[in-house]
Image (tube, rainbow, N blue to C red):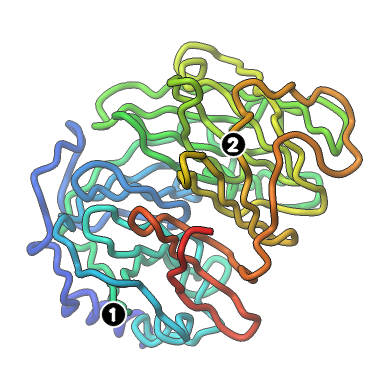
Amino acid sequence: MVKRTTLSLLLLSIVITAGALAGDVDLGPGASTGAPALASAGPLAFGPDGVLFVGDSLGAAVWAIDTGDVTPAGPGPIDAPGLDAALAALAGTTADRIHIHDLAVNPLSRRAYLSVARGQGEDAKPAIFTVSPGGKIELLALDGLRHARAALDNAPDPAAQGRRGESLRLDAITDLAYTDGRVLVAGLSNEEFSSKLRVLEFPFDKAAADASVEIFHGAHGRWETNAPVRTFTTFEIDQVPHVLAAYTCTPLVKMPLQGLLTEAKVKGTTVAELGNRNRPLDMVVYSQDAKDYLLMANTSRGVMKVDLTAIAKIEAIVSPVPDIAGLAFETIADLQGVEHLDRLGEGHALLLVNDGDARSLRTVALP
């Protein structure tokens, strides 16, 4: 009770108040004002005019929240050492009960947003924090913000488990991205071919499209339909919008965006196998010296810089791969313990780093 009271007081007194930030963005006919009823806060993505999209796997929904955060928060890097302890102090708990799920940078304000669970198990409560250039950390007050909800009608049942006993509902939403008036949602469904890429029209005023995705997994030597996309981004290949997605163990797959809008089943093209016994965590695309690269953080294979030069014409992987194949990449030795990353302006990335004892935010030049 004490922790919840502390959090309520913080929500009332926080500098970033709803009234100061709320804008006039069209969220759709179902928009309302007040604290969104988040059951969980997972993947994050930014849309137009400071709209923050929040993936809520437990609630089987994507939320669009009008933060009103459209004014530059200041120049310079974002660096925040001892992040776990700082978040815990604001939330009225201890650092070991803070779990950071995702990081997204608002491109308008250059302010970082973190989705967090406070507590463990059924008692865990979602929260969203912001970190400004200069390292100022604040709890985002949700009480008076305008928001809208898009439900996922085919999410896994809350009691559904995978073959290792893991909760399938937690993978209802594994990643989000916004592009050209659409929110792309990766995750699992309750259908036979459970790997899904859903497309939500934004504002949330139209029915969603979704496609079951089939890929060839070189490390496993077979076509798969039940493994979820772990992280993805959008990228134009020969001026055609594509989704570039990574799966556990670690196939990298491209698929045209148009197919997700018009087809019930989509077969992705595996363009790289980046090594097994590994889980991809986060990725961004950037240009450097007139070439395009993918920067991807992983659980056991570090941060990879993948050269996308050959992605349009590279031969698809459709046979077993013992280790690595496809697009060329290098591992960035200087980047260790990276759990999440996002672009911070044109030439920099913001990293969420775990050094074993604590987490921190660090700004680095794109390699």
Residue at figure coordinates x 68%, y 41% from the top left: 247
Marking on residue 308: 2
Residue at figure coordinates x 30%, y 83% from the top left: 5
Q: Is residue 146 left or right of residue 208?
A: left
Residue 289: percent from the left, percent from the top? 47, 45
Residue 27: percent from the left, percent from the top? 20, 38
Kind of residue sitting beneath label 2: Leu
Q: Quadrant of the N terminus?
A: bottom left
**Mark 2 crowdedness (10 Å alpha carbons): few <14, some 14-19, many ≥20:** many
Q: Is residue 257 above or below residue 7?
A: above
Residue at figure coordinates x 31%, y 41% from the top left: 149
Q: Is residue 35 above or below residue 95?
A: above
Between 97 and 81, the one lying in front of the other is 81
Q: Secondary structure at mark 1?
A: loop
Q: Is residue 84 above or below residue 113?
A: below
Q: Quadrant of the C terminus?
A: bottom right
Q: Secondary structure at mark 2?
A: loop
Residue 123: percent from the left, percent from the top? 50, 70
**Label 1 sits on residue:** 136
Kind of residue sitting beneath label 1: Lys
Quarter of the rendering containing residue 190:
top right
